[in-house]
Amino acid sequence: MAFIEPAGLQDTDNYRCREVQTESWLALAAGIEAEVAQYFMVSARCGCFMQAARSLNVRTTVLRKQLGQLEAQLQRSLFNFQGSNLTLSREGLQLHAQLIALAHERTLPLVEQPLIRLAVAESILHDILGRDLISLLRRNASVRLDIISLDSELALQAVSADVVLWLGAVDSPLPGPTFATDEPQHLARLDYFPHIAKRYSRVTSRPDSLDDLADFMLVHWQHDRQIDSFAPWNQLVEQRLAGVVQLQSYELMLEMIRCSACIGLLPGYISRFDRALIALPGLFREPMQRHAWLAVNADSRQQTEVQELAQLIRNTFHERRDWFEP
């Protein structure tokens, strides 16, 4: 008569078999490259491939490819999608626990990012560079960036930074940073005009002489009082006995021009940045100009991250070169 193994014993053997199989494929975890293991752990923590790629400063396609190769290597599916949520599969949870245990024996690499200090003229930061800096942060969530807003010549003289972008005189970058830099690079000429919001100024009623400005409120960014080339505008504001608002905030000045029927001095490119604003050229005979200059700290210019940031700024101005052409 054939021997029939008790059901309980069969279940125990099956459990032991599955346990041996699990231990067998998990043993491969020790051979996973540290970088790939980090990709897996960060993806598990973020629950989103896109956010994990940003944190690791890699392309999402590269991350997905590496994780796909890992699944093929282990012959296990490590992730599940529940709607738009990314979760670990049962095998993914097992691998996650195994890698945590291995971390006591093999520390996964954590690369400290160097701190990069960017000093930039406030108006340039707001109007021209801000969007590209946001794009940089979207691509690289691990970057360490210290952004210093320059709102005066005194701030420029006192600042210490790796990359400096400032507005200077027509024919010279001086006064510039006081620390040692490479040769300052000229990026663009900026022409300035009084501006008003289109919604408050029909073509037939727009001021075309200084006398016509008497019917409008003027807003004046205090920083502009220091600029010699803005003397015509500054003199007009100083002569006003009424209808003038002095502001310390560049953004608030822009908002008042947009929303309060005010007129303020802005760079000519601003209508490219905000199509609700329109320039009022021809009110002043003397041109009002500034020039954008870029310099890199001589002590840190060899750093890859510093070079990349400086190149990002150059690319930004090159891509928007039609903003500055007369």
Image (spheres, grey):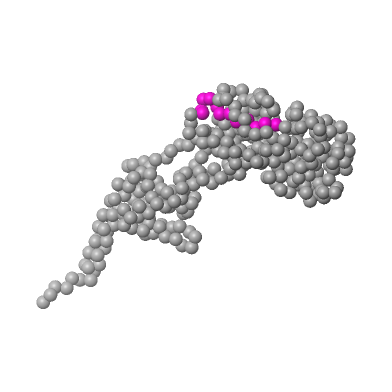
Question: Camera-side residue: 106 or 83?
Answer: 83
Residue at 57% x, 22% y: name it: 180
Question: Camera-side residue: 59 or 43?
Answer: 59
Magenta range is: 290-301
Question: Camera-side residue: 177 or 247?
Answer: 177
Residue at 69% x, 41% y: name it: 269
Task: Tell me residue 97's x, y (percent).
Answer: 36, 52
Q: Residue furthest front?
A: 326
Q: Residue furthest left?
A: 1
Task: Tell me residue 278's x, y (percent).
Answer: 76, 45
Residue 250 in sight here: no
Task: Tell me residue 26's x, y (percent).
Answer: 30, 53
* Residue 178 falls inside the magenta stretch: no
Question: Is 298 above or below relative to 207?
Answer: above
Residue at 27% x, 61% y: name it: 18
Residue at 88% x, 38% y: name it: 211
Position of the N terminus by quadrant:
bottom left
User: Is residue 67 shown left or right of residue 139?
Assistant: left
Q: Residue furthest bottom?
A: 1
